[in-house]
Amino acid sequence: MKKRLALITYSGLPCGAESERLMLPHLATAGVETEIVDWRSTLCDFSQFDLIVLRSCWDYHLRGNEFTEWLRRTAGEVPVLNDPKTVLWNLNKFYLREMPTIGIEIAPTVFVNGGPITSSAWQGIRSWKKSVVKPAVSASAHKTWLFDSEAVPDENELKSKMQGQAFLIQQFIPEIETQGEISFVYIEGAYSHAVLKRPAAGDFRVQKEHGGSAELFFPSPALLDQANKIAGAVQQVRDSLYCRIDAVARDGKLVLMELELIEPELFLGLADGAAERFAKAIVRRVK
């Protein structure tokens, strides 16, 4: 009897992203019956599947409670990957607070969760040439904005723009503009390929919807070794079906920007064999 797999998308991409579509022939060859399904579909009985893989559910951050409830309910009926515990941990960017405790460098960050911003934190923010503000729960640079040291907003303005949400203020890493951000893709904890993302001229956001570009990237042995050490140090990366590690190389050292363990674009179309590698990893989990 064929195994049934659901690749989860959202209403804006009813046929899934290119990476999902590229896997379909490989999954079919392995005898896995696959459907690309909107996670909010009211017509789908998710319990009919043998495995559910979160892929391009790119509106989850706009429907936080609804997504969390769907995830927990669905995971009670059928296995979901990445593991829901990992997804919920990764959902809130405050997980970044844990990274320095295990030796992983992140951009200098102030985490704001309702309480006042301390005077020492303000001193640091004002010393940065530029700063980025982003919600703790966000994707695709949603509600992310940049300000420089000459135009630091006051606390009330920041909290008003974040509409009561927890948020982060991070020192802007200029290498994002001059060199780009590197995405290291891991499948089952093992390095697969890397992509260099660059913002459009005059912008700081590397996402495609904001004019950013992406191309296959071959990291130096030193950078790949650092990425592998990050992957090895974080249990959620080691244990997951997939992860994208986003980092910036600064003076030869990686600065972690984010771990993407929910629904990252994996750029499978840019690297030879990547779609087949990912499909095989899914087949190992579904059989």
Image (cartoon, rainbow, N blue to C red):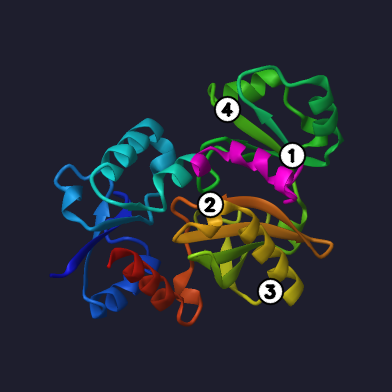
In this picture, is 161 found above or below 143? above
**Gap between marks 2 and 4 measured at Cα:** 23 Å
Residue flagged by tag 2: what amino acid is it? Gln
In this rendering, the count of numbered labels is 4
Q: Which residue is mark 3?
A: 219
As shown in the figure, which amino acid type bears the numbered disc 3? Pro
Q: Is residue 210 visible?
A: no
Label 4, on which residue?
166
* Relative depth, front residue between 122 and 286: 286
How far apart marks 2 and 3 lie (CA) works out to: 23 Å
What is the spatial separation of the Cα atoms under label 1 and label 2, in whole angstroms?
28 Å
Say which label, 4 or 3, has the lower sequence index. Answer: 4
Which numbered dot is residue 131? 1
* Residue 228, quarter of picture: bottom right
Secondary structure beneath label 4 = loop
Asked whether the residues under the numbered discs 1 and 4 touch, taking CB atoms below 8 Å apart as contact, a structural biologist would say no
Tell me what residue is drawn at x 63 percent, y 39 percent: 145
Q: CA distance from mark 4 to mark 3?
A: 34 Å
* Residue with the mark numbered 2: 236
Label 1 and label 4: CA atoms lie apart by 16 Å
Amino acid type at mark 4: Ala
Pointer 1 with pointer 2, Cβ within 8 A: no
Q: Which residues are magenta?
A: 89-108
